[in-house]
């Protein structure tokens, strides 16, 4: 899956930096990282929904 076309150069750089950081994580740390990222994504979705609902976006 190539999503680089939708990412800015800064986002692509950040993605590569995170990829290097997680490369050496063990299985348990990887699961924790995945869980935390999913939680942040859900919070972000809730914020976007709230802003749209209240026409702040």
Image (tube, rainbow, N blue to C red):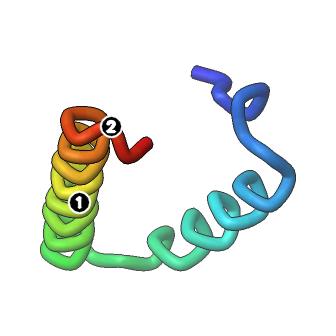
Q: Position of residue 43 (x, y in %)?
A: 18, 57
Q: Which residue is mark 1?
A: 34
Q: Is 52 situated above or below 21?
A: above
**Which picture quadrant has residue 51?**
top left
Which residue is drawn at the image coordinates 36% and 77% (left, top)? 25
**Which picture quadrant has residue 45?**
top left
Mark in the foreground, 1 or 2? 2
Q: Position of residue 41 (x, y in %)?
A: 27, 52
Which residue is drawn at the image coordinates 65% and 28% (left, top)? 3
Q: Earlier in the sequence, mark 1 or mark 2?
A: 1
Q: Position of residue 35 (x, y in %)?
A: 14, 61
**Which disc number belongs to residue 57?**
none
Which is nearer the eye, 22 or 51? 51
Question: Circle 1 — which element?
Answer: helix
**Which disc number belongs to residue 55?**
2
Callout 2: 10 Å neighbours few (<14), some, many (20+)?
A: few
29 sits to left or right of 4: left
Q: Please say if the residues under marks 1 and 2 sit with CB atoms less than 8 Å apart.
A: no
Q: Residue furthest right?
A: 9
Which residue is drawn at the image coordinates 53% and 78% (left, top)? 21
Question: Circle 2 — which element?
Answer: loop
Q: Residue furthest top?
A: 1
């Amino acid at each position: 899956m190539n999503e680089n076309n939708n990412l800015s150069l800064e986002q692509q750089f950040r993605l590569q930096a995170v990829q290097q950081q997680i490369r050496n994580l063990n299985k348990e740390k990887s699961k924790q990282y995945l869980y935390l990222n999913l939680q942040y994504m859900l919070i972000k979705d809730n914020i976007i929904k709230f802003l749209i609902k209240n026409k702040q976006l």
